[in-house]
Image: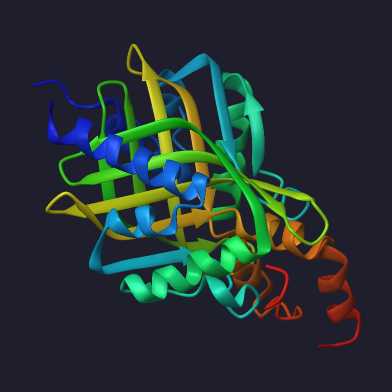
């Protein structure tokens, strides 16, 4: 098996552990100094700031798990080159508060070191994500700010 | 060794956007291409999903009408036989306002017979909107719901 095939399997295994809520299994896929970054507005989605190390990543995944009861995903595209893997995925999260589903596409880029994930970087259509999380459209708020001269 | 389709497509795309030279890119897009750049289409009409070569060329023309690519840097790139993904950092100029815009973009492309058949692009669109507005969007901090 090539290193690329192996690393693709490792990423899919990580996603499966997250789906099962197996937090320790997820963390076992990562290096101790794993770096996690989502390109999203962290002044709004405060828990989505950069995370460094397993303890911070554990805290992030626990926070997500406390807010969402279910995570499902589909992977329409996965590519690997050496120690890098890129995944395009459709993600579905169900909110614990009201059972509403937040669904969005995301690009995730993983970097491996010695068979473990050392870096995770995500890019999301963050404007849409904020609207789904907030359960309201942002556009009228922007227009309102302009009208108020803010 | 044959050049990967991504490189030809990338060169042609930048030439189309910056120089309004569309002939090269036209030859590299399949008639049945499936294309989506997710984002707020009410603010940026060239975002969204479209199908077919004519529609995609129209989107590229709109990009050329609105932006100039000053610089781009590939932060990550993976090439498959007929596919490619990359994370890019773009420095653009919005032509209507002359404002600089800096974007991080994830791109997943699939090719058939050297022509683009599928493109998915994701952008940190909240950041894009704030840059286009020239100010921060003030929303409540969603510490308890996000």
Name the quadrant containing residue B7.
top left
Q: Is residue B110 above or below residue B139?
A: above
- Camera sees residue B56: yes
Q: Is residue A38 above or below residue B53?
A: below
Q: Residue at x 36, y 53 (%)?
A: A25
| Quadrant of the image containing the N terminus of chain A | top left
Q: Is residue B17 above or below residue A47?
A: above
- Camera sees residue B102: no
Q: Residue at x 38, y 66 (%)?
A: A36
Counting from the top left corner in percent of width and height, residue B124 is at 54, 60
Q: Residue at x 58, y 61 (%)?
A: A65
Name the quadrant containing residue A45.
bottom right
Color theme of the render: rainbow
Counting from the top left corner in percent of width and height, residue A120 is at 35, 58
Counting from the top left corner in percent of width and height, residue A12 is at 37, 38
Extreme residue in the left direction: B1
Say left or right for B4 vs B21. Answer: left
Counting from the top left corner in percent of width and height, residue B138 is at 74, 81
């Amino acid at each position: 098996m090539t290193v690329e095939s192996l690393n693709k399997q490792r990423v899919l295994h990580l996603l499966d552990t997250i789906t099962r809520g197996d937090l320790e299994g997820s963390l076992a896929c990562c290096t101790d100094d794993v770096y996690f970054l989502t390109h999203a507005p962290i002044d709004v989605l405060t828990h989505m700031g950069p995370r460094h190390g397993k303890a911070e990543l554990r805290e992030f995944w626990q926070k997500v798990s406390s807010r969402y009861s279910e995570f499902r995903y589909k992977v329409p595209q996965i590519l690997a080159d050496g120690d890098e893997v890129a995944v395009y995925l459709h993600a579905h999260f169900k909110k614990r508060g009201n059972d509403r589903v937040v669904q969005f596409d995301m690009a995730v880029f993983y970097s491996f070191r010695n068979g473990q994930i050392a870096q995770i970087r995500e890019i999301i259509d963050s404007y849409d994500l904020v609207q789904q999380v907030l359960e309201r459209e942002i556009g009228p708020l922007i227009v309102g700010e302009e009208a108020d001269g803010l | 060794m044959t050049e990967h389709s991504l490189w030809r497509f990338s060169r042609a795309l930048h030439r189309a956007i910056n120089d309004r030279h569309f002939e090269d890119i036209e030859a590299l897009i399949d008639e049945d291409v499936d294309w989506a750049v997710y984002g707020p289409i009410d603010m940026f009409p060239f975002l969204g999903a479209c199908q077919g070569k004519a529609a995609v060329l129209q989107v590229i023309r709109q990009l050329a009408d609105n932006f100039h690519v000053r610089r781009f840097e590939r932060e990550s790139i993976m090439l498959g036989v007929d596919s490619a993904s990359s994370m890019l950092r773009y420095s653009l100029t919005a032509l209507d306002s002359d404002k600089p815009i800096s974007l991080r973009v994830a791109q997943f492309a699939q090719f058939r017979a050297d022509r683009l058949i599928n493109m998915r692009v994701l952008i940190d669109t909240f950041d894009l909107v704030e840059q286009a507005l020239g100010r921060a969007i003030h929303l409540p901090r969603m510490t308890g719901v996000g």
